């Protein structure tokens, strides 16, 4: 009988395919989730939702405008903690059009915090920033890179070919960025130091 209970507890209580759903928070619709497969394990400890075939999430503001969208190959949502664990080709785009790419990201909805200890690439309109370790508000508008590795300045679109984003760029080593405490690069409101393009 114990084995039967263990087996039952390891099975999802819900298995839904081809899902598009809206999720509310405090009476307001705040998220849209699209996924090929949604499994709910509410007998596990801690209970969680599994999105092992990929997930796409949109986060809305109070006016139902998309503040950010997130894609990942795999995701787990621990509903008691209100914590997302996003894994594999994690891609985020914020309201300003900035793009964030990493392999592992945590989103703590209770604290309104997004963070990772892995390599991250942030593409802004005029530069690409890379580093290891990252923390942000959940709107992805104010963020900190804990160990910046490089800043790549890109040419204006009028003068640069579309494929020159990486090859025709200037590089700034982490130690040439303006000094900040604890080896940290705070992207906003601090301003980054501009450099001349390097000839290759």
Image (cartoon, rainbow, N blue to C red):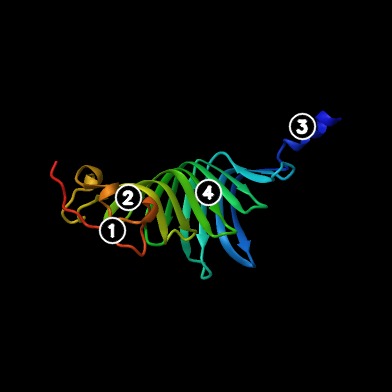
**Residue 173: assigned label:** none
Q: Spatial distance from mark 1 to mark 2, Cα to Cα? A: 10 Å
Residue underneath mark 4? 106
Residue drawn 53% across the image and 69% down it: 62
Q: Which is more N-terminal, label 3 or label 1? A: 3
Q: Spatial distance from mark 2 to mark 4, Cα to Cα? A: 20 Å
Residue drawn 51% across the image and 70% down it: 63
Q: Which percent across, then down, holds residue 10?
A: 72, 35
Q: In the image, which is nearer the foreground, mark 4 or mark 1?
A: 1
Locate the N terminus by quadrant.
top right
In the picture provided, is 114 more to the left or to the right than 123? right
Rendering quarter of residue 50: top right
Labels 4 and 3 touching (C-beta < 8 A): no
Q: Which is more N-terminal, label 3 or label 4? A: 3
Q: In the image, which is nearer the foreground, mark 4 or mark 3?
A: 4
Labels 1 and 2 touching (C-beta < 8 A): yes
**Residue 7: assigned label:** 3
Q: Which is more N-terminal, label 4 or label 2? A: 4
**Residue 129: assigned label:** 2
Residue underneath mark 1? 192
Q: Spatial distance from mark 4 to mark 3, Cα to Cα? A: 29 Å
User: 10 Å neighbourhood of mark 1: few (<14), some, or many (≥20)?
Assistant: few
């Amino acid at each position: 009988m114990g084995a039967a209970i263990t087996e039952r507890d390891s099975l999802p209580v819900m298995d839904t395919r081809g899902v598009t759903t809206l999720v509310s928070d405090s009476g307001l619709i705040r998220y849209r989730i699209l996924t090929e497969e949604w499994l709910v394990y509410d007998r596990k400890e801690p209970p969680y939702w599994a999105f092992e075939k990929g997930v796409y999430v949109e986060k809305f503001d109070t006016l139902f405008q998309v503040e950010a969208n997130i894609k990942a190959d795999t995701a787990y949502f621990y509903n008691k903690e209100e914590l997302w664990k996003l894994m594999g080709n994690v891609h985020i785009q914020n309201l300003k059009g900035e793009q964030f790419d990493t392999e592992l990201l945590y989103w703590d909805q209770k604290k309104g915090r997004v963070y990772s200890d892995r390599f991250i690439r942030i593409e802004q309109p005029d530069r690409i920033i890379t580093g290891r370790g990252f923390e942000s508000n959940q709107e992805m508008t104010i963020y900190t890179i804990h160990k910046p590795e490089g800043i790549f300045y890109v040419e204006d679109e009028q003068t640069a070919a579309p494929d020159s984003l990486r090859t025709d760029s200037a590089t700034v080593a982490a130690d040439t960025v303006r000094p900040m405490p604890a080896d940290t690069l705070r992207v906003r409101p601090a301003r980054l130091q501009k450099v001349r393009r390097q000839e290759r």
